[in-house]
Image (cartoon, grey):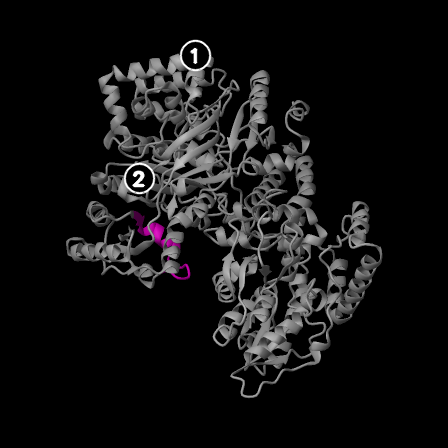
Amino acid sequence: MIELLKTIIPENRVKTRYIDLVSFAADAGFYHLLPKAVVQPISEAEIISLFQFSQKNKIPLVFRTGGTSLSGQSITDGILVDLSQHWRNIKVEDNGKLVRVQPGITGAMVNAHLKKYNQKIGPDPSSISAAMMGGILSNNASGMCCGVTLNSYHTTKFIRFVLPDGNTFSTENKADYSRFETECSHLSDSLTAIKNEICQNELLYKKIRLKYQTKNTVGYSLNAFIDHTHPLDILAHLLIGAEGTLAFIAEAVLQTVPDEQFKSTALLYFPTIKAACEAIVPLTNAGAAMVELMDRASLRSVENLDGMPAIVRNLPDTAAALLIEFQEASWTALEERVSEFLLSTPSLELYNAPVFTSDDAEREFLWKVRKGLFPAVGAVRASGTTVILEDIAFPVKQLGNAITDLQKLFELYDYNNAIIFGHAKDGNIHFVVTQSFNSKAEVTRYDLFMREVIELVVKKYDGTLKAEHGTGRNMAPFVETEWGNEAYEIMKKIKLAVDPNLLLNPGVIINDDKNAHIKNLKELPAVEEEVDKCIECGYCEHKCPSRDITATPRRRIVIRRALKKLQSAGDTVNYNLLLKQSEYDVMDTCAVDGLCATACPVDINTGDLVKRLRRENHSAKANRVALFVAKHFKFTERLLRIALKSGTGINHLLGKNTLTKLTGGVKKIFPAMPLWSAQINAAPDLKVLKMNVPVTGAATTIIYFPSCISRMLGTYQGKEKNILQTFISVCSKSGVAVKMLDNVSGSCCSQIFSSKGFSAAAAFTANAIAENLYKSSEGGRFSVVIDVSSCAYTLHHIRPLLSEENKQKFDQLTILDSVDFLHGIILPVAVVQHKKANILLHPVCSLEKMKTTAKFIQVAKHFAATVTVPENTGCCGMAGDRGFLFPALTASATNHEASEIRALKFDGYYSTTKTCEMAMSAAVDQNYESILYLVDEAI
């Protein structure tokens, strides 16, 4: 089978290694199947070939984009078709009123492209940063703001798709309507017959119309037969919410909605959840765009987060909250809207007076907390248990009573840590329970509980079993329960008419196995602290620089869990195979940049996990060598400078790419050999290290710590000054007195050792630099400025490595990177003489982790007229020296950012870390420089 696949898809895009099958097996849901192969097609022609292969060999196909689905709809034991890499095209049309997308671009990236038009897509799921358009469409995603009128179904204008028989149609092409009737006459006639059947059945017609007045993603979108006339339009809208069971969506054009620029947000507290529910209708009538419910248990899971209001920790056990937001087109309209609501608050049973905020940072924090509730609860669960997120809807007026009944079921089935939250405005709530599936009794408990939930939702309240997360495997056995026999039989007819061989995502939506919801359940064994908190939601993946080459944070954690399961099962063959394959995918190509933690709702830093694994894998000899290097780093630095001088000399004589070719050849034989970069210049002149720059009457004096990177790589092509001289120049022009760090040669922040897991060497270096910084700054009297952002970030986090005495010294220090220094000290006094017209920025990972990217942009805007930050900006994968060791990582990590900007021209390209500047220079074929050069040339 695999060899046949490789005749359709090139071998490099057919993944069959054991580690690939294991790591791609998982999505965000709690079901698990192991694929036979993972393929990554790049064209419709390859999709058609895959369909033909599937039909001929009777092997199921499942399409996946972001893998954030929760109901088991993006897993398979057949062929998994990964669309996350090669289907990312986007085009904004009609001045932002329309947007054309492929399935592999995230919803957040689409909105980023629409931002300058003050528009956004209608669907706004909590997972929008990681969820991709293929899944957003295939699951008929909605979310917190769009309700039922602005979801995927109602905002999709045109759609292009490929059927299992290979036929391709687009509703944008008028000729395709008649072609569909001719070339797919049987399917066209079947859809027309179903439409007639529904229209002639008054009770069923009314039922369908009523069901879609609230959120509903159970089964197929039967409203397509009521809303549309032509069978091609009907089929196109059936695909929205079909969860990839009917066709492949190649492209869609969506109508966008206004993204109101003026917003005011408040977290309202209520003494009981019933009181909170009684406020929903008044809030909706008051014009609230979003009304999100959180019960006391959900609030408890996030009450200790930095930034959470103190009141949350002191709420009574019966309390609940509503996170609300008003959105308007003007500040005046917003103030009027909020004021009108505040006048009505005496009629609500509030716990305290509402406090609104329009501060973007405060608002974004509150919404990040809300969006992260599901993973946050997963993080505090008992090790070895699985997280189950259900998604139901009730009539809004009965929501309070329904939640009370649901809480009784929690108590009856011993789900003591269950939480409830959701989109209260739509009567749509999510509840989370945690349990293990390691015994028959536990599986039975879940089964009985769910059957009672279904009875409660469908029979007592006439609600919806899946409001927005899709049917999947989870609710497939109960589609008929909610819809009734007539509607369910129609859904089966649809499936058979479009996919008669039942090979496209089989078992999802239509499933005759009434126990499908309790089969193929995912195990989450206890492994280690970093791993055990993860629920495999996938929110981290779009941040990962190695996502397109080896693995992502989620997949690295999946691999760690698989190793544990294999070890427990005594499967030594597969354990050893997976462990061996993990060396490159898990260990070597992780940039340990930590950006995954910025996207993870519970701050899991997979980089820290990898650093620990590297540390544990080092031999005693390797640790001794690293410690020797650390203790003699001054000598090491001299050797490296000599090597750089020799290398650049050879390149000067024999051609600028000589060393790159030479080291590349050696690397093929000895993979540990670093690859020489064409961006390396001769080591900088260090005479400046012997200088102090006194300034008469200076208001500010700083200690300058030129990083070891700058001392070795601080020469920039075409620049008269090196980075050290440029820093001194900026200070001199701005009246800032400079004292050089004492004994600066041989000084290091410790990153080179900590990133590789050499703990003793890192600790030695960290203590040495802490002592030096304390002494040089006269006990913290003067701020210390370091010229590389990644080194500043490392210095901010060395405290755990320090002795008790040095911790006390460290606590007295103020350490600034170049951005903080420029923003806080230079900007207020700088006199701009020359502004560049148009510049490009690359914000490095460290800035995002230090939350100083905004300052970086502000500095740039002060010294340049137009500043651009690429939409696809992200980690370059350089990770200090890792890009020299594994250049494929950097090439992959920079690909999307470089592709976005390579054809554009700017007057300058700037960043804040030398090795990242080198990586971007190579990727874009332009010279990136330190932001210090922009400032120096402007003042």
Q: Which residue is drawn at 82% across and 49% down?
A: 666
Among the two numbered marks 1 and 2 on one chain, the one whose residue lies closer to the N terminus: 2
Q: Is residue 302 magenta?
A: yes
Q: Where is residue 619 in the image (x, y as percent from the top left)?
A: 74, 55
Q: Where is residue 740 in the image (x, y as percent from the top left)?
A: 65, 79
Relative vertical location of residue 248 with respect to residue 310 in this rendering, above or below: above
Q: Is residue 159 left or right of residue 408?
A: right
Q: Where is residue 862 in the image (x, y as percent from the top left)?
A: 49, 67
Q: Position of residue 88 (x, y in %)?
A: 52, 39
Q: How many residues crowd around disc 2 within 10 Å: few (fewer than 14), some, or many (20 or more)? A: many
Q: What span is colored magenta in the figure?
A: 291-308
Q: How many residues crowd around disc 1 within 10 Å: few (fewer than 14), some, or many (20 or more)? A: few
Q: Does the magenta stretch include residue 242?
A: no
Identify the element where label 1 is drawn: helix
Q: Is residue 768 left or right of residue 634?
A: left
Q: Gap between marks 1 and 2, in whole Å?
A: 36 Å
Q: Residue at x 39, y 29 (%)?
A: 475
Q: Which numbered marker is on residue 147? A: 2
Picture quarter with the N terminus:
top right
Q: Is residue 804 visible?
A: no
When asked about the image quadrant of residue 631, the answer is: bottom right
Picture quarter with the C terminus:
bottom right
The residue wearing badge 1 is: 185
Q: In this view, does 449 lie to the left or right of 347?
A: right
Which is nearer the eye, 626 or 230? 230
